[in-house]
Image (cartoon, grey):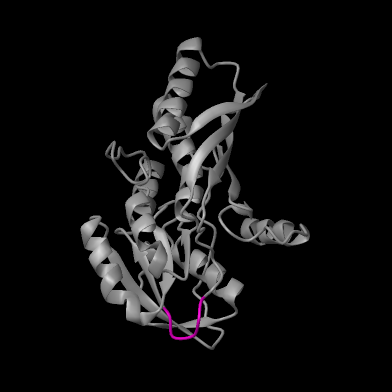
Amino acid sequence: MKQDKEYYLINKLSSAHIGDDAAVIGDTLYSMDAFFEDTHFKRQWMSMAQIARKAMLVNLSDAIAMNAQPQYALVTVSIPPQMTHEEIDELTKSLQETAVQYGCEIIGGDTIGSDKLHLSITIISKSATPLLRKGLEEGDLLAYTGNLGQSKRDLERLFRGERIEADSRFFEPVLRVDFVAKARGFLRTGMDISDGLYCDTNKMLDMNQYGFESLLEIDEAIGLSGEEYEMLVGFAPEHLEVLMDIANETNTPLTVFARVANNNTRYPCKSHHFSV
C-alpha cells in the first residue's frame, strides 16, 4: 500500500529532526510538501490561481501548526508543455499573493519541464515555542478544530464530475493562525490534519506510545477526510475551559473526541490520495 511505503521510506532516514510537521533546528523550522497533479489535484478541477494558492496554503499549514511564523519559501514547479505564459503568470501571481498574506517571501526555487504540473515548496519559519507532536500524558484530551468532512465529501463530488463551491475546504483550507498562537501555552501537542483525523491521531499516539479512549463516535466521513488542514491538539484536562474560551474568541470550532490512555487502541487508517 502507498502509505505503508511512505512510512517505510521515512523510517529509513536517520535523523532526530524527523517526526513533526517541520524539522526544528534552533529557532528555525524547515518543512516541505509536494502538490502533484493527479495525486493531489486534477487540472480540470481547479484554476491556476486555485492550484497555486492551495499548494502554498498546505505548505504554510506546517509552519502555522507548529506555532511558527513563515519567513521564506523555495518553490519548484514542473511545467507541462501546454501551459501558456498567461497560465504561468496566474500561477506565480497566486503563489506570491498567498505567501505575502502570511508574511512569507518567495526567495527562489527551480523550474523543470514535465508532462504534468507539479509543485514542491519548502517553507523556512521561526518560532521561540514550537508546538510538537510529542509530549502527551495519560489522561490528556484530544481535540480537533473546525468542522471536518467537507474535503472528503467535495473530493467525491469532483470524482463524480460535479462542481463544488469556490470556498470549499478542498480548494481553500482554513489555517488556524490566531487559535494556535493564543492557545500555545495551554497545549502539550499539535499537528495539522493532512491525512485525515484517524491517520493523524494514530501518528500522534505512535510518537507518544499511548492509545486512546473514545469520548465521541467519529464517523468515517469525518475520520477519513484528508487534506482538511485543521488542527489536532492534545492538552491537560484542566486547560479545557480556557481553550474553549480561546476557541470562541478566535471563532474556531473545537471538538474534544478522545482521552489519551495506556493502551494500543488505534483508528482504522487508509490513504486519501488518488492517482489516475
Q: Quadrant of the C terminus?
A: top right
Q: Looking at the picture, does residue 272 appear above or below residue 159?
A: below
**Residue at (45, 50) in percent of width and height:** 64
Q: Nearer the viewer, residue 212 or 133?
A: 133
The magenta stretch spans residue 184? no
Q: Looking at the picture, does residue 122 appear above or below residue 183?
A: above
Q: Looking at the picture, does residue 88 appear above or below residue 272?
A: above
Whether residue 37 is visible to the viewer of this picture, yes or no, is no
Residue 18 shown left or right of residue 33 in the figure = right
Q: Quadrant of the N terminus?
A: bottom right
Q: Residue 275: image x %, image y %? A: 56, 44
**Residue at (22, 58) in percent of width and height:** 249
Q: Looking at the picture, does residue 91 appear above or below residue 180?
A: above
**Residue at (50, 64) in percent of width and height:** 200
What span is in magenta?
Answer: 136-140
Q: Residue 118: image x %, image y %? A: 58, 32
Residue 163: image quadrant is: top left
Whether residue 83 is visible to the viewer of this picture, yes or no, is yes
Residue 172: image quadrant is: top left
Q: Nearer the viewer, residue 204 or 80?
A: 204
Q: Residue furthest top?
A: 85
Q: Residue 273: image x %, image y %? A: 53, 50
